[in-house]
Image: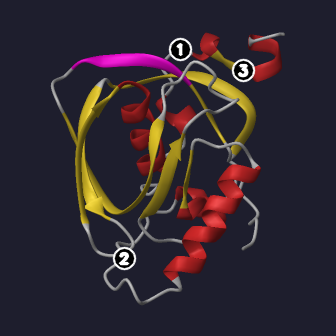
Amino acid sequence: MAIKEILKMGDPRLLEKSKPLKDLNAVDLDQLIQDMIDTMEANDGAGLAAPQIGINIQLVIFGFKKNDRYPDAEEVPFTVLINPKITPIGDQIEDGWEGCLSVPGLRGVVPRYKKISYQGIDQYGKKIERKVDGFHARVVQHECDHLFGILYPMRIKDFTKFGFHEVLFPD
């Protein structure tokens, strides 16, 4: 178990496209996933992508029962998702506030598909197929963007709704 350093926006590794994981035995997957869980939890994250800790493979984790960074968000089941594919369900786009462990202290309003279907496998090779909406759909799209070198500020349309959390949401 180890808390890993999270790469920050500006690190060119965050802009690379990740490679699909073809062999589940190619890396110490159990250790990597545990490190990602420890890192996500230590930083109160809703999800984490392997590229955020410098591992260039298509692996994301996400999920929480309650998250202080997103107090109004519904529970999202903990998921390990490898080689994900996302398909929008309909064309309805929804704006929502996002933050990112690689973009600390900032928040922005990001348009995302309201409903999606996602597929992939877990660490045991078991197929995952889900249709989701709301915050669950937002988290999956956000984490999977990391696999293609996309950080959420790159998706912002209105920069009047982007800034430091403590300025936008003073207590």
Residue position marked by numbered label 3 in the rendering: 163
Q: Residue at x 55, y 37 (%)?
A: 65
Q: Is residue 56 above or below residue 103?
A: below
Q: Which residue has dot 2 on it?
A: 21
The amino acid marked with disc number 3 is Gly
**Which of labels 1 and 2 is toward the front?**
2
Q: Is residue 81 magenta?
A: no
Q: How far apart are labels 1 and 3 at the CA level? A: 11 Å
The amino acid at mark 1 is Asp
Who is closer to the viewer here, 130 or 169?
130
Q: Quadrant of residue 7?
A: bottom right
- Residue 164's image quarter? top right
| Rendered position, 145 above or below 69 | below
Compare marks 1 and 3 and give the one earlier in the sequence: 1
Residue 170 location in percent, x, y? Answer: 82, 10
- Crowding at dot 1, Cα within 10 Å, few <14 / some 14-19 / many 20+, comes out as few
- What is the CA distance from the residue labelled 1 to the residue labelled 2? 35 Å
Q: Which residue is mark 1?
A: 158
Circles 1 and 3 in contact, beta carbons < 8 Å: no
Badge 2 marks a residue whose secondary structure is: loop
Quarter of the picture containing the C terminus is top right
Q: Residue furthest left?
A: 90
Q: Which quadrant, please, contains the N terminus? A: bottom right
Q: Could you tell whether 13 is left or right of 90 in the image? A: right
Q: Position of residue 125 (x, y in %)?
A: 29, 74
Q: Residue furthest bottom?
A: 26
Mark 2, Cα crowd under 10 Å, few <14 / some 14-19 / many 20+, is: some
Q: Is residue 54 visible?
A: no
What stretch of residues is rendered in magenta?
Answer: 92-97
Q: Please name the amino acid that badge 2 sits on.
A: Leu
Mark 2 and mark 3: Cα distance apart in space: 35 Å
